[in-house]
Amino acid sequence: MKKTVLTFGLISGAIMTAMMFGTLPFTNSAWLQAHSMVIGYTTMVLSFMLVFFGIRSYRENIGGGTITFGRAFAVGILITLISSVLYVVTWEIMYFGVPSFGERFMTMCVAHVKSSGASPEAIQTELNQLKYLDNPFINAALTFTEPFPVGLIITLISALILRKKMKPQAGGSPATVEA
């Protein structure tokens, strides 16, 4: 299981990392800022499709064509964890390591909060919360909550679709596969 999980988790994380670094030169673009959530979550969904293929690969190559929901979920969630950790590491490198990226990101967040139409008290509360992003541990924890739920949902769906149990024959020996 380790080889399958590592292979598919690293590839999934590499896809998200490549997209993050690939869009980095365009962070000043108004169009990218307006569509960054759609682009980001689309990239996450596409990269987490490797959870499906990882579970299928495990089922076919290691499980002999069968896999329980629990084992499929375990394989999928481990792929998701590896990919999500790579996403967090990439974000931390970009936020704290790329000159002026963190400042530009904070400026964009502040502008978004101020243009939200909320009350001045609510705006001030949100601005105070943004200061916590300067703590790498809080930043990492909050960043982890972006890709992980997406991966969890895809893991659950993939485990449900791909589970196959052996059907016992008369006499108790497994013979056919049940979807």
Image (cartoon, helix red, strand yellow):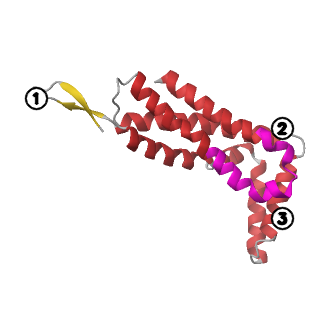
Mark closest to the chain's N terminus, 2 or 1:
2
Q: Which residue is mark 3?
A: 111
Q: Is residue 169 left or right of residue 163?
A: left
- Give the CA distance from mark 2 to mark 1: 64 Å
> Image height check: is 64 above or below 126?
above
Point out the stretch of residues depicted in magenta: 21-44
**Crowding at mark 2 (Cα within 10 Å: few <14, some 14-19, many 20+):** few
Type of amino acid at the residue the image marks with label 3 = Ala
Q: Secondary structure at mark 3?
A: helix
Mark closest to the chain's N terminus, 2 or 3:
2
Q: Is residue 68 left or right of residue 143?
A: left
Q: Residue 97, which numbered label? A: 2
**Crowding at mark 1 (Cα within 10 Å: few <14, some 14-19, many 20+):** few
Residue 138, horizontal then vertical, whole percent: 69, 48
Closest to the camera, between mark 1 and mark 3, is 1
Type of amino acid at the residue the image marks with label 1 = Ala
Q: Can residue 144 be seen?
A: no
**Crowding at mark 3 (Cα within 10 Å: few <14, some 14-19, many 20+):** few
- Give the CA distance from mark 1 to mark 3: 69 Å
Residue at 70% in and 43% down = 137
> Image height check: is 130 above or below 170?
below
Type of amino acid at the residue the image marks with label 2 = Gly
Closest to the camera, between mark 2 and mark 3, is 3
The quadrant of the picture occupied by the C terminus is top left
Q: Nearer the viewer, residue 92 or 125?
A: 92
Q: Secondary structure at mark 1?
A: loop
Residue at 16% in and 24% down = 173
Q: Which residue is mark 1?
A: 170
